[in-house]
Amino acid sequence: MKHLFGALCSLLIIGAAQAQQNHAQKAWVDSVFRSLTPQQKIAQLMVIRAHSNLGADHVAGVQNLIRQYNVGALCFFQGGPVRQANLTNLYQSMAQTPLLVTIDGEWGLAMRLDSITRFPYQSTMGAVTDSSIIYQMGGAVGRQMKRMGVHVNYGPDVDVNNNPNNPVIGFRSFGENKEQVARHGVAYMKGMQDAGIMATAKHFPGHGDTEVDSHYDLPVINKTRAQLDSLELYPFRKLLEAGVGSVMIAHLFIPAIDNTANRPTSLSAKAVNGILRDELGYDGLVFTDGLEMKGVTKFFPAGEAAVQALLAGNDMLCLPDDVPAAIKAVEAALKKKTLKWKDIDEKVHRVLEAKYRLGLHSPQVVATENLVADLNSETAKVSELIARNAFTVLRNDDMLLPLARFNRQKKIAYVGLGATAPTAFGNRLQADFGADTFYLTYKATAAQADAILAKIDTAKYAAIVVGVHNYSQRPANNFGLSAPALKLWNAVNKDTTSVTILFGNAYAARNFCAARNMAAAYQDDVISQEAAADFMMGRFPAKGKLPVTVCNFGAGSGLAVSNLFSAGFGPQWLAVDSIVRDGLARRAYPGAQVIALHKGVVKYHKTFGRFEFDEASQPVLFESIYDVASVTKTSATTLAVMKLWEEGKLDLNKTLGDYLPIAAGTDKAALTLKDVLLHQAGLNPFISFYKETIDKSGKPADSLYRTALEPGYNIPVARNLYLRSDWNDTMLLRIMQSKLGAPGKYVYSDNDFILLGKIVEAVSGQRLDQYTYYTFYKPMGLATTGFRAGERFGVERVVPTENEKWFRRQMLRGTVHDEGAALFGGISGHAGLFSNAYDLGVLYQMLLQGGEWNGKRYFKPETIAYFTDYHSNISRRGLGFDKPEKDNAVRKEPYPSQFASPKTYGHTGFTGTCVWVDPASELVYVFLSNRVYNTRDNNLLSQLSIRGKIMDAIYRALQYEQTPTPVPMQAAAVMQ
């Protein structure tokens, strides 16, 4: 009760602070509003063009508009960072009302300013499957903008680009999959807005399916309203739901929305007020796209465009062609009562409220000291992360990728098409593989191309890598690719074993559809080229997915090419197939993934079955993601405890009371962390927390749940189900109030690891998912391992668990199966982790290698040895890890395998998973299934001992390979 009272007090304090903040905002807005003349109110709705590279006349013109009219905002274009900072300070100093500073910086300030390193394009981000990486980029871009004195960034672009000939969107879009566009758009937006920058969802209602650039004419989209609702509008809905600060309206003619001749959506009340405001309920700031663009000016003169834009429902008019004329036309419309002052005042209030929230109620000065260095401080790190996660292998017919598999005694060549000088990628191939290098620019003649081909033919290279560089991001003139370059590529691809790497827009792959081995790197900067070279060296796996359709590759295509070299597998491994398929036939699970690594080599890696028992459901792929249940205990919580212990931040001999204030004064306070790790502290094994949160009918109680995210209800439990924010404290209190068992007894308990997860958070200062992500999963390149998989990856790749009918009442997919972990928002020390088999294999291979992976050390070998050893006289447990029974050699049912050495460690999971490491055999084995589909009562996986039999078969296969004269495989390996 005392703890609940404290939580209630905290909520009251937060509420009071919010009320005080709202009062301060209203006071400032009202004060500024009262200071404005009628003309200045109109001018507050204008966003004027500003450059830092156009000289004194341009600067004087901007100053005049600020002084004479008190315009509301600037939109900066080309120039330099220090010059723009100085001009920002100058313009702000003379403005009666603080200026909203905006910029169109979809890939950061480098889109407009010199001296700045470019962040990746949105098409490159579209190849990344993990939206948390996009959030990181959004945060980095936001911090860059804030340092520059910018308040609004006109991005992200959430147009669904389903037209490969789109002349203006294309590479600026996340791709053609509406869910991916929405997911990445939300992540990018949240990253920027969490950094204090207002994001803008554009170009409403969707500019992706056009073949006309609205800068030069008015594009026409002939789609039905139903088609628009199902595709183009989908990402905008998701960003509006997620709280995007502003929306930009496109100049499009869409008869299904407004069939008034030549009326662009930006000037259409049916589009802005009708759909965006009324239907979608959006009350944020609305910008027009540039009113100087021909999509508007072709049919509406400057003043009339401004009036029509305001009538349509826009708040801010971007780049009016003639500001005085626009203001004069608006004044005339007000006088005629075509426009109403009530509407103008409402818009001005909305603009001023945005200015307050963005900090403009206080003076802002952009410091120029170290400005360029500050602006570039995060770009390389984020760009490298995206380049590695975006790299996409489209074909690998000759198994050449990564090139590290190739026999280095054989000669290879590199041909750089379009390169005007040696490239970073070519230099790396030369250094890493001894490649001979050739370069052909797009201005080269056919004779020059023939000369390179003659040299290649004479040298008889075993393989040739072709890099396609320096081509246009836009499809006009076939991306600028020259006929001689394409002729050379065709000759090389036809007559030799070759690999093609595209360093640019993936749509250009339509010129190279015949490639037998092809990958997309998406951009042509040094970071992307170095990442491609690192992939060739086998330093990370390819996990990117094509964001658009090209050749016969659909959006979402991309081979999961391992950087752990596969040795291939012979008939001795078919026993594993037989066991897994027998489990499928008996409906022990709908599908599964299995991987076995021996001495760092992938000896076996296969997928089986489907997501569901229905034959029409999705097949399980290597990149499919499973809820690993209690494997979370070792793959997240124990690893975190190990790291903190190794760093001296955690003492296993200390108690719960030493680390968790909530334990103080309870009988749990004296329990040592070591006993908790060993499951012998006496904690209750399991508490059905959810039962306390449902009403008499069994439904989630209205007093504790909401169907949408709202203040005070922000814990995501399942799809459209949010728990009251203070209830996690109640759950911890219930653990403290639960009856403590007798000491010195082994009782497996989820509560042990719930509390260990909270200790990790208390000691590290980070949420468990964040600590494990930044400490292990991200630096190791584990693309699928992490919490809240549905939020990070979308549900499409996540295998469903159970159609749960007594609490959440829905098919669980992308949200954690375990009820307790769900009530903790999907992030808990005992459950909540998701992964595919490959990434778990990498994680445990790191442990097997003594804590080192790809040249980076994560643990000392002695730390791993200590935690994975036996530590109890009353159980088989290690510290956090499960281990074989100590009498395995004589047990009727050995666990986990009759061949597992005493050094073996790992864990199993309730959903039908396991991971085991045997240092004595240098083996890592991972099995993932969704045996709880469609009910947790299906226990065939355990009854048939499938996981153990697979492990036995793996040991036998390895023994077979290592025996000089192989003996026949034992029939026992195959289930009868």
Image (cartoon, helix red, strand yellow):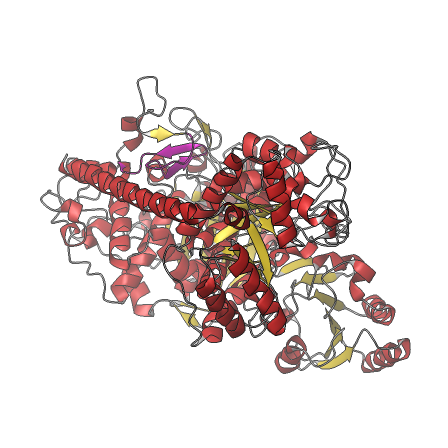
Q: State left or right for residue 434 relative to residue 565.
A: right
Residue in the foreground of this view, choosing between 865 and 199: 199
Residue 124: image location, x then y, percent: 62, 58
Residue farthest left in this picture: 665
In this rendered view, identify the residue nearer to me: 399 or 514.
514
Q: Quadrant of residue 647?
A: bottom left
What residue appears at the point 65 percent right and 79 percent down from the top-left corner? 433
List x then y, in percent, for residue 898: 40, 50
Q: Nearer the viewer, residue 827 or 90?
A: 90
> Does residue 3 appear in the picture of this structure?
yes
Q: Main secondary structure of the magenta part?
A: loop
Instruction: Where is residue 897? Give x, y as percent.
Output: 40, 49
Vertically, is 446 above or below 73? below
Question: Is 520 drawn above or below residue 188 in the view shown?
Answer: below
Using the image, determine if residue 813 lies above or below residue 835.
Answer: above
Q: Which residue is at 20% across, 36% downward?
A: 734
Magenta stretch?
707-726
Horizontal side, residue 210 vs residue 837: left or right: right
The quadrant of the image that shows the N terminus is top left
